Image (spheres, rainbow, N blue to C red):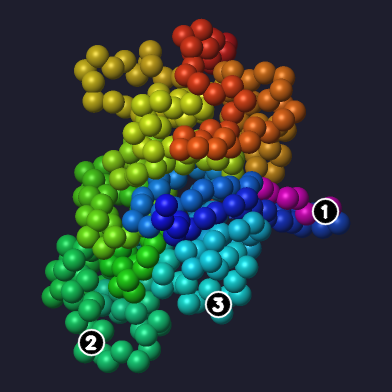
Amino acid sequence: MTRPLLDVRDLRVTFQIQSSGAMPWHKPKQLRAVGGVDFTLNPGETLGIVGESGCGKSTLARALIGLVPATGKAEWIDGKDLISLSPRQMMKYRSDIQMVFQDPLASLNPRMTVGQIIAEPLTTHHPNLKRAEVKERVKAMMEKVGLLPNQINRYPHEFSGGQCQRIGIARALIVEPKLIICDEPVSALDVSIQAQVINLLIRLQKELGLSLVFIAHDLSVVKHISDRVMVLYLGKVMEIASSDDLYAHPQHPYTQALLSAVPVPDPDYDPVASVVPLKGDLPSPLNPPSGCVFRTRCPRAEARCATEAPALSLGDHQVACHFPGPLTETEIARARRTEAA
Ligand SMILES: Nc1ncnc2c1ncn2[C@@H]1O[C@H](COP(=O)(O)OP(=O)(O)O)[C@@H](O)[C@H]1O
Ligand SMILES: [Mg+2]
């Protein structure tokens, strides 16, 4: 067995929300953004992380690189716990773990040239590199991600959204990281451009033997790129499995509902007949349901689900549900009736 690149145990992030100015004596509220997440990531592996907006995906990513305070453990391959590092110690790891963000243009400094933007992490981590050497590496990297090296002196606004995301990827890769965390890297792009950026990431991941964490709010986006997929709901892991297994044999009712909403290229597919609706709205992370966080929307919830939080099972296909398994026709029909009512 190879040692995982990253081994995350019981990672939690809670934000203190101050009450509004009118009643400052009210106690701050606790917002549980990440509620105890476990997963491993192997060298060279791509893990997709999927969940609705607000379920804690970005917070989880930010916690791993020390941008928000967290508890629990995130053991790097060298045995160091990333969560317990001081900001100074974290600097050393920041060249190993790079991020690519959702909004390509907004995440690039508009006053810097593309060359300066891509070079920045390199000069931060290797201040003694000669200018000519930096320029050479930047140009080579631009070429690698499909940008024209002669555009090195242009500014971000002169590029399209897809090209800006290539700039963000070049900037992440320039320090030769072991892991890149891509936080919804294609959500802001046109569908036609999304596939190009995903294919670029797949190619680079293979070529460079990188590990990738690829965050998306939609299961269809991560399917192609991920070796394994983790489904999050209200800061909790619902299911983790190999991509093939998760899409073919989802065990958690939530995963099944998410998958039912993914369009499939099948002429006989009838989206109205196939979608499993979820009842009600997403609960607030300020006041998550007792027991299983998904139970208020689950077509299968029973009394036990309200009192006892299901643990994530062990093994290759992990699921956190007291009653895992495929939804029956009856359950799907019941879910539809509840929604129609
Ligand atoms: N800095 C912060 N302060 C307070 N609450 C936050 C902060 N960042 C995120 N949150 C809250 O944490 C929850 C998870 O947010 P986020 O990680 O951005 O979700 P996602 O990326 O899955 O959309 C949300 O309820 C969000 O409002
Ligand atoms: Mg996010």
Give the residue type that dot 3 points to: Gln
Q: Residue at x 64, y 32 (%)?
A: 310
The residue sitting at 53% across, 33% down in the picture is 319
Q: Which mark is residue 89?
A: 3
Q: Along the polypeptide, which appears first: circle 1 or circle 2?
A: 1
Q: Say which residue appears at 69% left-offset and 44% top-offset.
A: 286
Q: Is residue 84 left or right of residue 250?
A: right
Say whether residue 30 is magenta. yes
Looking at the rendered structure, the secondary structure element under dot 1 is loop
| Amino acid type indicated by mark 1 | Lys
Quadrant of the image occupied by residue 60: bottom right
Query: Which tag, 3 or 2, sits closer to the chain's start?
Result: 3
Q: Which residues are magenta?
A: 26-33
Vertical placement of residue 122 versus 10, above or below: below
Q: Dominant secondary structure of the magenta stretch? A: strand
Element on which disc 2 rests: helix
Query: Which numbered tag is attached to residue 115?
Result: none
The residue singled out by tag 1 in the image is 27
Please state which of residues 169 and 242 is positioned toward the viewer in this rendering: 242
Amino acid under disc 2? Glu
* C-alpha span from label 1 to label 3: 34 Å
Q: Nearer the observer, disc 1 or disc 3?
A: 3
Q: CA distance from mark 3 to mark 2?
A: 27 Å
Confirm whether the magenta stretch covers residue 183. no
- Quick one: SS at disc 3? helix
